[in-house]
Amino acid sequence: MYTFKQHSILPGFNLALGFTLLYLSLIVLIPLSAAFIRTAELTWPEFWSTVTTPRVLASYRLTFGASFAAACVNAVFGLLVAWVLVRYHFPGKKLVDALVDLPFALPTAVAGIALTALYAGNGWIGQFLEPLGVKVAFTPLGIFVALTFIGLPFVVRTVQPVLEDIETELEEAAATLGANRWQTFTRIIFPAIFPALMTGFALAFARAIGEYGSVIFIAGNMPMVSEITPLLIVTKLEQYDYAGATALSVVMLVISFILLLIINLLQWWSRRRNSAT
Amino acid sequence: MTTITFPLSADTQKQRTTQEPAWIRILLIGLTLIFLTLFLFIPLISVFYEAFKKGADVYLAAITDPDAVAAIKLTLTIAAIAVPLNMVFGIAAAWAIAKFEFRGKNLLITLIDLPFSVSPVVSGLIYVLVFGLQGWFGSWLAEHDIKIIFAVPGIVLATVFVTVPFIARELIPLMQEQGTEEEEAAVVLGASGWQTFYQVTLPNIKWGLLYGAILCNARAMGEFGAVSVVSGHIRGSTNTMPLHVEILYNEYNFAAAFAVASLLALLALVTLALKTLIEFRNQQHQQRGHE
């Protein structure tokens, strides 16, 4: 027999689910559907030409390129930070562990102006890079720095719990069988944390693509050079080009949904991998 | 003879097989600290440095400026509306998802997480499409002289949107782990639904609820992109703290911008401290539970 819900003696199911669905519909689903419905007013060629102008294409290349590079750096250093926090002891470790979440807690605008001040030509870090010919603030490199900051906690926080759960018995067995430390890492530890690492990478990448607050201060925002897609949406909105802004946001939404799907699959893979070992 | 030293050597051997040589450990710790110093600590310190660079007088003047005070008040008001709303939603969603088995549960969990994967700018834009002058209800709202976009209600809506998942996603796994036995016992013993919730469930989830609320509050007060699209940037009226920082910064009033920013950075530090305290308390609690 088809049953929507299994029997339970606990009360409040209808009220709780009803309220949840009403709230989600009013706050999330109906407003989100507005973007798709308004875009449907455009014909397909109109839509396509709006989202593939040279300026828009340049913004995609920049947004995805910088996000991908930042997520790669976060994957490498996130793994390193997680490893050091789980396996080693050093003074101030608790403080470091707590501060890793700073990019989650610090408002993006604050991160944006702080990074800009640091990497500007006269800033604390910029003054050392400028003589070397490396300009960070107001260039695409600055966008990469901001996105690396924003995505930093994702890989650490997805890899850390998995690394904590790995039994040292496995590593001891590998060592007993003659593996050196590097072999144990690449053959035993790395495969166990790989799904979590990919999940963290995808989360950092997804967050970076949509990021706005921290980037606009450091980017310079030159069309074709250092203009990210979210900024282009805002620019179109300020010029009352609602159709253009909406069409671009639909592209962003579709990409976010695809990434969300990939992240869910990765998490499912990660859980299965961990329950198997 | 060798048997005497055996336990000792076995012990050091074990140390060696599951740990890297000392120089690698020091190298990795060093690399980590350099990376985190460059990308986390220096940016954090620079906020406070830039804020106080021109002296405490300039700092105090910046944060007691009427526009800054209005921005602080607005930010607090918005958080005071958005956090309780999402708290009620989080409890309702977690109650339905954790205490009952029904079809489509995984889809519902994914939908709750949806705002996390939407760009902040898009989160603001969709409310403009619904309530803006060109939007679905735009002309009706204009006729009745109700302002949502470029006014406080729009800022609240955009903030609620971006913070929807925070409390629900803390409570769902927590309540799933706790199961339904305690509530079932209460109901069998004759407690009403609300009594069960207030006296059994709420004491069990209060720390998770607080944890989610703290994270939700940090994002609600710090949200920039979504709020920037719907606010209209009217000084002293629809300017939140992050937007005020942007205006001051774009006017090259850096000291004042960093002064207001330092308040937000302080909020972030308090958030992290409270978060760490609750995590520490949970760990202690769990260890006591195991003993």
Image: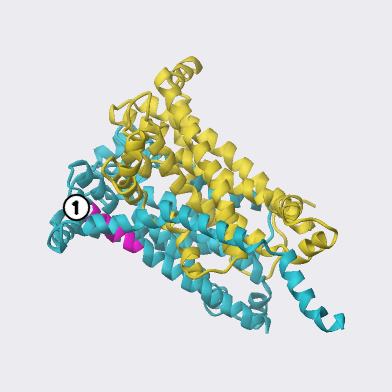
- B266 lies above or below B239: below
Q: Residue at the spot x=29%, y=34% of the render? A: B133
Within 10 Å of the Cα at label 1, are there few (<14), some (14-19), or many (20+) other Cα atoms? many
Residue B260: within the magenta?
yes
In which quarter of the view is residue B68 placed?
A: bottom left
According to the colouring, which chain is cyan?
B
Residue B94: within the magenta?
no
Q: Residue at the spot x=63%, y=75% of the render? A: B183
Which quadrant is home to the C terminus of chain A?
bottom right
- Residue B209 is at least partly visible in this image: no
Which of B167/B138 is in front? B167
Residue closest to the far top: A45
Residue type marked 1:
Ala
Magenta segment's dominant SS is helix
According to the colouring, which chain is yellow?
A
- B212 lies above or below A26: below
- The location of residue B71, given as percent across then percent down, is 22, 55
Q: Callout 1: residue from which chain? A: B
The colour scheme used to paint the residues is by chain
- The location of residue A85, given as percent across then percent down, is 57, 63
What is the span of residues highlighted in magenta in the rendered image?
B258-267
Q: Residue at the spot x=47%, y=28% of the render? A: A60
Q: Would you say B102 lies left or right of B123 here?
A: right
